[in-house]
Amino acid sequence: SKVTGLALLKVFDVVLRSELDPVWHRIPPRAKRLVSDLTTLRKLLSYLTEYDSVTFYRFLVAVRSEGMARRALWIYTDAANRLFDVAKRRVYTFAVDDS
């Protein structure tokens, strides 16, 4: 579908919002939060390849704090916990040199 193909592009947020704008006032609050969550997750996917591991982890921690404050639904999933754990390990795991 049109939206699925755009999901990874930066214009995704604009296209999705333009599609929903005519009925935005009828969309339940939970669905609005999900739209916001999609925007955040798309940014995270993009930043994963653009930022170094320390910068990405710092951004992720800020997103988690903000997401918890606004009750983002994705923050409480198993996949989110795994994302936070792996991002943290990328920063705080030390390599041991066997030589």
Image (spheres, grey):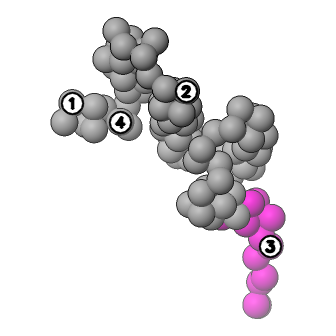
Magenta span of residues: 86-99
- Mark 4 closeness class: few <14, some 14–19, many ≥20 residues within 10 Å: some
Mark-to-mark CA distance, 2 and 4: 21 Å
Mark 4 and mark 1 lie on one chain; the one further toward the N terminus is: 1
- Mark 2 closeness class: few <14, some 14–19, many ≥20 residues within 10 Å: few
Task: Look at mark 2 in the image and give the residue it sits on.
Answer: 29
Q: Residue at x 25, y 36 (%)?
A: 5
Q: Nearer the viewer, mark 2 or mark 4?
A: 2
- Direction bottom: furthest residue: 99
Mark-to-mark CA distance, 4 and 1: 9 Å
Query: CB atoms at circles 4 and 1 under 8 Å apart?
Result: no
Mark 3 and mark 4 lie on one chain; the one further toward the N terminus is: 4
Report whether residue 52 is seen. no
Classify residue 63 by image quadrant: top right
Query: Residue 94, labelled with which disc?
Result: 3
User: Which residue is at the front of the view, 19 or 41?
Assistant: 19
